[in-house]
Amino acid sequence: MQDQRNAELLTRAHHGDQRAWRELVDRHIRLVWAVARSHRLSPDDAADVNQTVWLILAENLTTIRHPERLSAWLTTTTRRESLAVLRLRGREQPVDLWDSVDEDEPTPEDLAIGLDTDSRLWRAYTTLTDRCRQILHLLAFAPETPFRQVADAVGIPANSLGPTRGRCLEVLRRRLARMEVVR
């Protein structure tokens, strides 16, 4: 069943074939989870997004225009659902810095340095092209996702993903180095 194309699986799932539906889910579940978790959702919120995405797919089995790009469709749908959850629930997690100090926890100074480093990294990241941001995002937050699936999600050939990722990382390194000099 693994060599079946998405179009055939979507059609069979629409006609009630549970094996086809399971194959679709098995092929893409890690991608959907990875995209949801990459938005820093709680495990419960990520589970809700995951469930919603599969429901949306079930409702749209016959309306997917490009079945060969199902990974990209699922990535976009998961991203949209994750952002909707974030809008509803917010991202802030209150932390009491004055609570009992634990020697293993970072100090406020460590947190400030980490935030500064993170801020510089994200500023450099936002200057990358959309394709580079997509590739680095998926590979960073879903390292277990097969290259072929990541390549499908961003719309490039699988054998181009490694070199493209390398070029994207090199651009990111140069921009971070430039920011360090400017500081």
Image (spheres, rainbow, N blue to C red):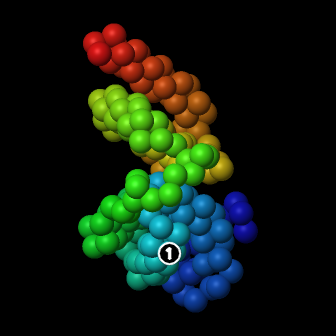
On-image quarter of the C terminus: top left
Query: Could you tell me residue 17's position as x and y percent?
Result: 63, 85
Query: Could you tell me residue 47's position as x and y percent?
Result: 51, 74
Q: Horizontally, is 134 left or right of 151 in the view?
A: left
Residue at mark 1: 44
User: How many marks overall?
Assistant: 1
Find numbered disc 1 in the image and state the secondary structure of the residue it sits on: helix
Residue lying at the far right of the rendered structure: 1
Q: Horizontally, is 159 left or right of 156 in the view?
A: right
Q: 11 and 118: which one is in front?
A: 118
Q: 99 and 11: which one is in front?
A: 99
Residue lying at the far bottom of the rendered structure: 16
**Mark 1 surroundings: few (<14), some (14-19) or many (≥20) residues within 10 A:** few
Query: Could you tell me residue 26's position as x and y percent?
Result: 65, 68
Residue lying at the far top of the rendered structure: 181
Query: Could you tell me residue 176's position as x and y percent?
Result: 39, 21
The residue type indicated by label 1 comes to: Asp
Q: Horizontally, is 136 left or right of 129 in the view?
A: right
Q: In which quarter of the image is residue 59?
A: bottom left
